[in-house]
């Protein structure tokens, strides 16, 4: 199952497939009934403490990514299994990880996407 990224503020498209919100907090400025998602998996997002530590500081991104990957591996190892299982059970053909971060490069969703891609190899 291929995974892709998209910001919550970008218009949904039918080609997005199964849309999963991967943020711990609900995105600002979006009503719950207005966001087109199939699932909200808060547990795949970084911990509150790690998120606050990083706070959109690109100079901390590499360490943030390492810490986040460690959380994914140790704190709750079932988090990714739930995401993969739900993705495989869907007949959408692809899974779009939806996130609210402003920076399209330095964010947890990108780290998650790369980790999912690496673990499929």
Image: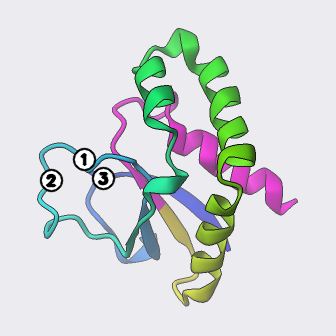
Kindly identify the residue that appears in the image at 24 percent across and 47 percent down: 27
Q: Earlier in the sequence, mark 3 or mark 1?
A: 3
Q: Is residue 10 magenta?
A: no
Location of residue 91 with respect to 104 vertically, above or below: below
Whether tag 1 and tag 2 are in contact, CB under 8 A, the answer is yes
Residue 31 in the image: x percent, y percent?
Answer: 11, 59
Measure the alpha-carbon separation of dots 3 and 2: 9 Å
Q: Residue furthest front?
A: 75
Q: Nearer the viewer, mark 3 or mark 1?
A: 1
Measure the alpha-carbon separation of dots 1 and 2: 6 Å
- How packed mark 3 is, by other alpha carbons closer than 10 Å (few <14, some 14-19, many 20 or more), is many
Kindly identify the residue that appears in the image at 57 percent across and 74 percent down: 94
Q: Secondary structure at mark 2?
A: loop
Residue 36 in the image: x percent, y percent?
Answer: 27, 70
Q: Which residue is mark 3?
A: 8
Q: Secondary structure at mark 1?
A: loop
Q: Residue furthest right?
A: 121
Kindly identify the residue that appears in the image at 61 percent across and 70 percent down: 82
Measure the alpha-carbon separation of dots 3 and 1: 8 Å
Left/right of residue 89 with respect to residue 92 in the rendered view: right
Whether tag 3 and tag 2 are in contact, CB under 8 A, the answer is yes
Q: Which of 13 and 30 lies nearest the eye of the viewer?
A: 30
Magenta residues, start to end = 97-121
Q: Which residue is mark 1?
A: 27
Q: Earlier in the sequence, mark 3 or mark 2?
A: 3
Q: Which residue is mark 2?
A: 30
Residue 43 in the image: x percent, y percent?
Answer: 50, 55
């Amino acid at each position: 199952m291929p995974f892709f990224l998209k910001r919550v503020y970008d218009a949904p498209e039918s080609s997005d497939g199964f849309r999963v919100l991967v943020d711990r907090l609900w995105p600002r400025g979006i009503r719950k009934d207005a966001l087109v998602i199939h699932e909200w998996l808060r547990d795949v997002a970084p911990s509150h403490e790690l998120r606050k530590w990083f706070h959109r500081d690109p100079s901390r991104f590499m360490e943030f990514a390492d810490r986040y990957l460690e959380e994914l591996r140790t704190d709750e190892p079932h988090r990714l299994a739930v995401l993969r299982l739900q993705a495989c059970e869907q007949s959408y053909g692809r899974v779009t990880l939806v996130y609210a971060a402003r920076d399209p490069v330095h964010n947890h969703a990108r780290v998650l996407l790369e980790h999912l891609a690496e673990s499929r190899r």
